[in-house]
Image (cartoon, rainbow, N blue to C red):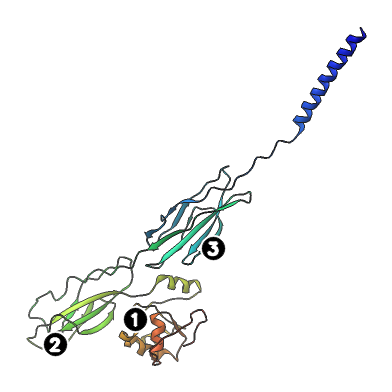
Amino acid sequence: MARNHQVAARFFFCIALLLFVMLAACSEDPAEPVNNPPHSPRNPLPADSTTADVDTVLHWEASDPEGDPLTFDVHFGTTDPPPAVSNNQSEKMYDPGTLEYGEKYLWKIVSKDDHGHETAGPLWMFTTGANQAPSEPINPDPANDAVDQPISPQLGWDDCTDPEGDPIQYDIYLDVVSPVTTKVDSNLSASTWNVGPLDYGTKYYWRVVAMDFGIKYNILRSLEKKGCNILVLPAGTDSETINKLEPQGLFLSNGPGDPEAVTYAVDTIRQQIDKRPIFGICLGLRNSHQFRGRQRWTGNILCGQRL
């Protein structure tokens, strides 16, 4: 009888011990799951190593293994590595504004989750296309081979268009021989030009050349961000017209061109140099040096060289 009691006691002791172990195991906290960093950003638009428009907007795809919400740091520019231009944004896109023509741009995206993890994507690259020439001047007035014209006619043609919407100016060539090489006026904004008096009974040849104005719109936007109220004038604007506008400063744009061929601009700068602050880049800076008789040009834009 006593032996049966001992067996029963041992049985209940084992049951109690088993229950204690089970309860102890259930009371322990479950292991925290491991949180993984985001996947690498992918599928860039523009695609890597392609040509893009100057008004392109950057897009990309990104995801997280656990579906955590993501934010992004955007690195973008023309240097390697590109600088950070936006931090902690939630959108999978970035608008850098209108870019420069024919420029190589680098960009990279860093994906970040809400657990402190981040994954940097690869370095992507694209190049913007070159600036295109304006359309050809057409529909001349007087028409080609016209006869019995007045000796002081008004020459006209259809307004040209530019693929990028750049401002257009015109150069006029007129001569009694063909091909026409004599330029008689330049930097016109209107598609008409008054000529004369010409010689009676003489055959004249004329030609119109349409050209981009030559200023980069990123320059204008940068000045506007600094609080400047900008008025863009034709390159051939004379000093008297500028004086009537009473600007607080005069910016000389980047070109394109050779300062030796734009003597009219040098003359205007000479008349403006003591009237108001003048600054410029590229061709504009070179023109400002031309009026001082410098054939070679130097300039430190970062230091703001005084003319």
Q: Which of the labelled discs sits on residue 235, or is there none?
A: 1
**Label 2 Cα neighbours within 10 Å, binned few <14 / some 14-19 / many ≥20:** few
Residue for badge 3: 84
Question: Between residues 240 and 48, which one lies in front from this camera angle?
Answer: 48
Q: Quadrant of residue 168?
A: bottom left
Real-space Cα distance between discs 2 and 3? 62 Å
Earlier sequence position, callout 2 versus callout 3: 3
* Residue closest to the far front: 3
Type of amino acid at the residue the image marks with label 1: Ala
Question: Between residues 239 and 58, which one lies in front from this camera angle?
Answer: 58
Q: Quadrant of residue 5?
A: top right
- Dot in front, 1 or 3: 3
Question: Between residues 68 and 144, which one lies in front from this camera angle?
Answer: 68
Real-space Cα distance between discs 1 and 3? 36 Å
Q: Residue at x 59, y 48 (%)?
A: 37
Type of amino acid at the residue the image marks with label 3: Ala
In the rendered view, tell whether residue 6 sits above or below residue 173: above
Residue for badge 2: 198
In the rendered view, tell whether residue 295 sits above or below residue 209: below
Query: Residue 169 location, x and y as percent?
Result: 29, 76
Earlier sequence position, callout 1 versus callout 3: 3
